[in-house]
Image (tube, rainbow, N blue to C red):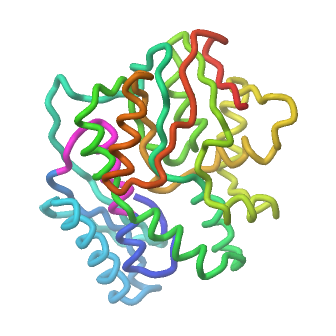
Amino acid sequence: FFTPIVDDPYWFGQVAAANALSDIYAMGGEPKTAMNLVCFPLKQMDISILRQILEGGLAKMKEAGVALVGGHSIEDSELKYGLSVTGFVHPQRVLTKGGLKPGDRLILTKPLGTGVINTAIKGDMASTEAIEKVTRLMAALNRDAASVMARFPIHACTDVTGFGLLGHLAEMVVGTGLGVVLRTAAIPILPEAVEYAGFGLLPAGAFKNKEYRAAMVECAPGLDPLIPDLLFDPQTSGGLLIGIAEEKADGLLAELIKKGVAESKIIGEVVTEPYEKIILK
């Protein structure tokens, strides 16, 4: 659970719920039940705000086919909301971050840039169109992507959230002895995020992510220095990052697009060397 990242309470509930449900989808599971987790400043905010947040979360749970079975709430000085989610998956179908194989292609199912645009929102510099676009993107479930993924022999998967694309990809690479080449021109990034990042509107989390994983990342000569910053941008309710064999990748991508996960892209490949490095080209 986390503090509000959008001003509208109902949409905040939707985004927080979608974010919480995403972990189950990333592991190849199907979410079934959830419990609300609430921290609310009763002395500073009207209770009607909490009602709207819970209504937004419940609507997203209903969309996902998830039953709300209870919750925990405490009075706190800062508003926070999220879910504790339980899902089902066959033991032999559990997906993890650690199964990448040489030659695998990497597919990303949502564009990047939510952290940058949320920073612009906090600074009152984001356009109305950008706010609406990023809010709907964050509130979108990874359910359809997961349902398509379930029909394919996936090697590894994670959801892209607070560590950014490069941070979560680094987790997939560490311990495998393999490397990754990313085709940066193929990576979907919200155009507003590129614009705002150019103004210096990068969240603090992007710099923390970069500091922690910078040693694993190598940039091709002449690469725009803004690109790695955007790839370290911490995401809220980001897409799935999927590793699949080369011969299956085009089929998976086609089915994702057919299902409506229209911004999915093949963004890179797994290589045998350099050892546990991510190359940006």
> 164 or 43, which is in the foreground?
164
Find residue 88 and report its image quarter. Answer: top left
Identify whether 255 is placed above or below 128: above
Q: Position of residue 272 (x, y in %)?
A: 57, 9
Image side of residue 262 versus residue 162, left or right: left
Quarter of the image with the N terminus is bottom left
Residue at horizontal 40%, vertical 65%?
139
Image side of residue 241 versus residue 276, left or right: left
Find residue 222 and report its image quarter. Answer: top right
Identify whether 224 is placed above or below 279: below
How many badges with numbers are in the image? 0
Quarter of the image with the C terminus is top right
> 186 or 51, which is in the foreground?
186
Identify whether 174 is placed above or below 147: above
Q: Position of residue 194 (x, y in %)?
A: 72, 58
Q: Position of residue 66 (x, y in %)?
A: 16, 59
- Secondary structure mostly seen in magenta is helix
What span is in magenta? 16-31
Q: Position of residue 199 (x, y in %)?
A: 82, 64
Residue at horizontal 24%, vertical 45%?
147
Residue at horizontal 68%, vertical 57%?
203
43 magenta-colored? no
> 123 or 75, which is in the foreground?
123
Residue at horizontal 68%, vertical 49%?
230
Q: Residue furthest right?
A: 222
